[in-house]
């Protein structure tokens, strides 16, 4: 039967021990040094003792498993580093932070002591100088801006004050009223009606009061008021243009195209045709069409019209003076073209001939 293999035995080893030996002093170091042989250096004796011990202690029959007795190593303690005081480290850190706040480049190794303080003072001075320059530049720019706005505001305020003083000063009060554009209307009567505006500054003229004063004159179609410094108020009047006269119980009324009575007379007025209101009234569509035809006629034809009628808007007719020629006009459309055609038709006929001109269709006029 096969025997189990024997387990090899591991020789017991003695754990290595560290022995710390204090460093000998100089005198002890010289005393422990082996004596030098005569005629040779002092370390020759050390080498010889080591060789003798090796020769005597070692042999061929020595146990290979026996632990080797190594000589103890002597460790010399290192010289301890000087400990940096915490106050110095904290001071350097504060100096670094102040330098960074002052704009100093902290990427370079931090300086400590007097050089760091000098660098910090220099950076602080530079920063203060820069801040003062910026503040001075900003202050100057703000001062110039404020001065410019002050000058502009003062100029505007002065101009407004001057305008107000001049406008409301008695130097610009109304002393004369000029009425322009009147022919039938009495200008003196208009001036008298506007007497309330005398003595007022031109800026305080009451235009509403002027409108109420001029409403009593039916001949006025429109007006405009102009202030002419220093003391004149000009009133430009556009009078109503009478186009025809209508017969009433008391005589004849001269009216314009809107039917407003411009003038009243007991007898017929020369130079204006009579508007026949048979079958119509003032303000009706027929009246409006007849008035529009009279307004569009040139003076050469208007002076020949003796009678006009318009019972409906498209049945306007006229009668001329002299031989009593009759004109069928139709409606008020294309009145300018109809007037031109009528003038040419009249030129082709004998003025004493009693004829009828039909221009209601201007593209195909007819003479009867």
Image: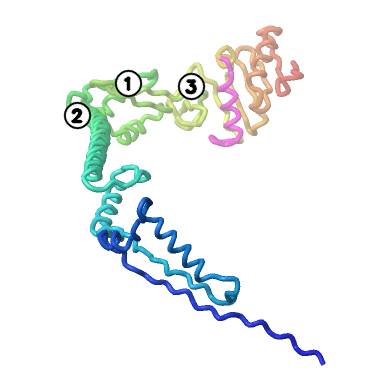
Q: Position of residue 73 (x, y in %)?
A: 42, 67
In the shown orientation, is residue 217 left or right of residue 25? Answer: right
The alpha-carbon separation of the residues under discs 2 and 3 comes to 57 Å
Q: Indicate whether residue 281 is drawn in magenta.
A: yes
Magenta region's main secondary structure?
helix
- Relative to residue 50, is residue 298 depicted above or below? above
Quick one: label 3 or label 1, which is nearer the N terminus?
Answer: 1
Q: Position of residue 256 (x, y in %)?
A: 49, 27
Res. 268 mark: 3
The alpha-carbon separation of the residues under discs 3 and 1 comes to 30 Å
- Secondary element at tag 1: strand
Q: Position of residue 308 (x, y in %)?
A: 60, 24
Q: Which residues are magenta?
A: 280-298
Seen from the viewer's position, the closer of residues 117 and 124 is 117
- Secondary element at tag 2: helix
Quick one: label 2 or label 3, which is nearer the N terminus?
Answer: 2
Quick one: label 1 or label 2, which is nearer the N terminus?
Answer: 2
Which corner quadrant of the image does residue 72 belong to?
bottom left
Seen from the viewer's position, the closer of residues 157 and 74 is 74
Q: Which residue is mark 1?
A: 179
In the shown orientation, is residue 4 left or right of residue 82? Answer: right
Residue appearing at x 38%, y 51% in the figure = 40
Query: Mark 3 Cα within 10 Å, few/some/many (few <14, many 20+)?
Result: some
Q: Which residue is mark 2?
A: 165
* Extreme residue in the right direction: 1
């Amino acid at each position: 039967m096969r025997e189990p293999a024997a387990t090899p035995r591991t020789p017991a080893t003695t754990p290595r021990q560290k022995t710390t030996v204090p460093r000998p002093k100089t005198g002890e170091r010289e005393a422990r040094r082996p004596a030098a042989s005569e005629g040779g250096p002092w370390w020759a004796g050390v080498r010889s003792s080591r060789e003798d011990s090796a020769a005597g202690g070692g042999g061929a029959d020595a146990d290979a498993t026996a632990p080797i007795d190594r000589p103890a190593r002597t460790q010399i303690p290192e010289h301890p580093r000087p400990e940096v005081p915490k106050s110095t480290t904290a001071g350097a850190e504060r100096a670094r932070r102040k330098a960074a706040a002052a704009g100093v480049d902290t990427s370079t190794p931090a300086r400590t002591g007097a050089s760091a303080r000098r660098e910090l003072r220099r950076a602080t001075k530079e920063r203060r100088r820069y801040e003062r320059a910026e503040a001075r530049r900003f202050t100057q720019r703000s001062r110039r801006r404020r001065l410019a706005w002050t000058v502009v505001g003062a100029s505007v305020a002065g101009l407004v004050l001057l305008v107000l003083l001049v406008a409301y000063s008695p130097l610009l009060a109304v002393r004369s009223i000029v009425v322009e554009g009147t022919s039938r209307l009495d200008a003196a009567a208009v001036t008298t009606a506007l007497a309330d505006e005398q003595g007022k500054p031109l800026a305080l003229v009451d235009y509403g009061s002027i409108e109420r004063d001029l409403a009593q004159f039916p001949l006025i179609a429109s007006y405009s008021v102009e202030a002419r410094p220093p003391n004149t108020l000009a009133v430009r009047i556009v009078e109503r243009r009478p186009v025809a006269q209508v017969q009433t119980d008391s005589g004849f009324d001269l009216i314009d195209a809107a039917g407003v009575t411009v003038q009243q007379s007991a007898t017929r007025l020369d130079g204006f045709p009579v508007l026949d209101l048979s079958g119509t009234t003032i303000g009706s569509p027929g009246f409006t069409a007849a008035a529009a035809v009279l307004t569009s006629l040139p003076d050469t034809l208007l002076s020949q019209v003796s009678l006009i009628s318009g019972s409906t808007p498209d049945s306007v007719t006229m009668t001329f003076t002299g031989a009593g020629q009759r004109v069928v006009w139709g409606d008020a459309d294309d009145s300018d073209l109809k007037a031109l055609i009528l003038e040419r038709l009249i030129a082709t006929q004998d003025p004493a001939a009693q004829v009828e001109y039909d221009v209601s269709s201007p593209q195909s006029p007819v003479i009867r």
